[in-house]
Image: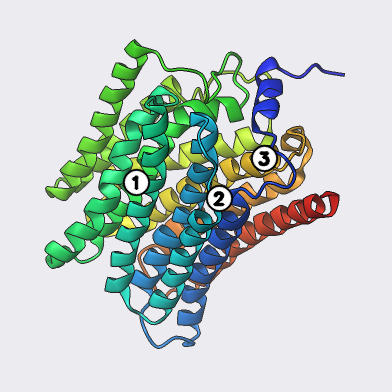
Amino acid sequence: MEEKPKTLEKLEALEKPEPEMLDPYDVLFPVGILTSLLAAFLWVAFQNSWVSFFPRQTHGNLMFFGFLWAFVSGFLMTAIPKMTQTSIANFFEIFGAVFLILLQWVLNLRNMGSVSVGIFALQVFVLILFVGRRFLQRRQIPFEGFVYFPFALFWGLAGPLSFFLFPQFGSSMLYVFSGQAVILNLICGLGSRLIPVLSRIPGALMPDAAGQHKRMIEIGLYAICLNLTFVLEALGATQAGYLIRAIFISAVAVRYFKVFTRPSVRTYVGWGLKSAVICLIVGYGLLGVFPEGSSLPFLHLVYIGGYSLITLMVATRVTLAHGGYSLELELKSKHIVFIFLILLIGAALRAFVVGSDLVAKGLSWSAYAFMVGLGAWLISWWIRATKLIKQV
């Protein structure tokens, strides 16, 4: 039998919780999946005239402020206390985050987009309070990738601010700031440690290992480079921002994510992560080359194949490790392959078949693929959660 890598053994020992402990991800991850299913289903409903309003902003709000934010909150509220060795999330913190996401459901289904944006600002502020309290207790960042974290929170608040102060931009800058900027900063920052570990790269440092001063300066410069691309986009140099972003992610993928480094053990999660990073690079590269009017299809290659796939692959590890399951399931469980393949199909359909035609029938097929992929992940998560409850 092949001996487990020492990094893997340490990760299992670090992340395995007491069975009776309720982690934030236990609640927030399934709420996030349900939100994404609702957001995707809105396009199917629109195609069949089941809703009376054009759901573009409603869809965007639910995806960024509900689906992705649920996973961001669930991961950080679970990981930050462990990384900083401070108090775990309490009942009011967890269900406060859940309540605000469910409030997004109500507001967006009632087509109250502006109020939804205001609630997102509150969601960001609540997370700042949660993280800030624990950093003040510890007064030390867990690892150098957290240099990106203040940028993510800054853009999270800058999005709603620009939406209300500069209404002429509509929701375009809102999704650049509170969508892309937030998620990419978290992917690059947290991913600099998590992706090599999840991909089982030899010698990958654990998330709880202390950062190095020289490396922190280097990563800080990388973070500034990434965030300047969002400033460029805000100033109107949209294609330049996209192209530089594609080059930047390529550099990060090689330097920090180690996508071309041979892993000690090949895993399905590792393949899913590499596929997602490639989607980010290709998507932003196409956005930088093609005219701005054709941006929506390629943005969905980034959103579905990139953000959503990375989110689910990281969440798979979190549910396995924190749920007390063997990480060997990352090697053996074929459902992981099905999930990332069906998401890649959905991303390809949306980017290269549907295009910019939001009334095209192919849009429903892309939505169906997306819903099947996330629904399959939810079912898998629920089976594992049910087993864990029976064990307790």
Where disc 3 sits, the SS reads helix
Is residue 30 placed above or below 209 in the rendered structure? below
**Front position among marks 3 and 2:** 3
The mark nearer the N terminus, 3 or 2, is: 3
In the rendered structure, the answer to whether residue 6 lies left or right of residue 66 reads right
* Mark 3 residue type: His
* Mark 1 residue type: Val
**Res 308 visible:** no
- Residue, disc 2: 344
**Residue 374 falls in image quadrant:** bottom right
Q: How is the image coloured?
A: rainbow
Cα–Cα span, label 3 and label 2 = 27 Å
- 161 and 294: which is toward the camera: 161
The numbered mark at residue 350 is none
Where disc 2 sits, the SS reads helix
The mark nearer the N terminus, 1 or 3, is: 1
Name the residue rendered at 32%, 78% in the picture: 112
- Residue, disc 1: 182
* Mark 2 residue type: Leu
- 232 and 322: which is toward the camera: 322
Is residue 224 placed above or below 340 in the rendered structure? above
Would you say the residues marked 3 and 2 are in contact, meaning their CB atoms lie under 8 Å apart? no
Is residue 12 placed above or below 128 in the rendered structure? above
In the rendered structure, the answer to whether residue 281 lies left or right of residue 117 reads right
Would you say the residues marked 1 and 3 are in contact, meaning their CB atoms lie under 8 Å apart? no
- 390 and 280: which is toward the camera: 390
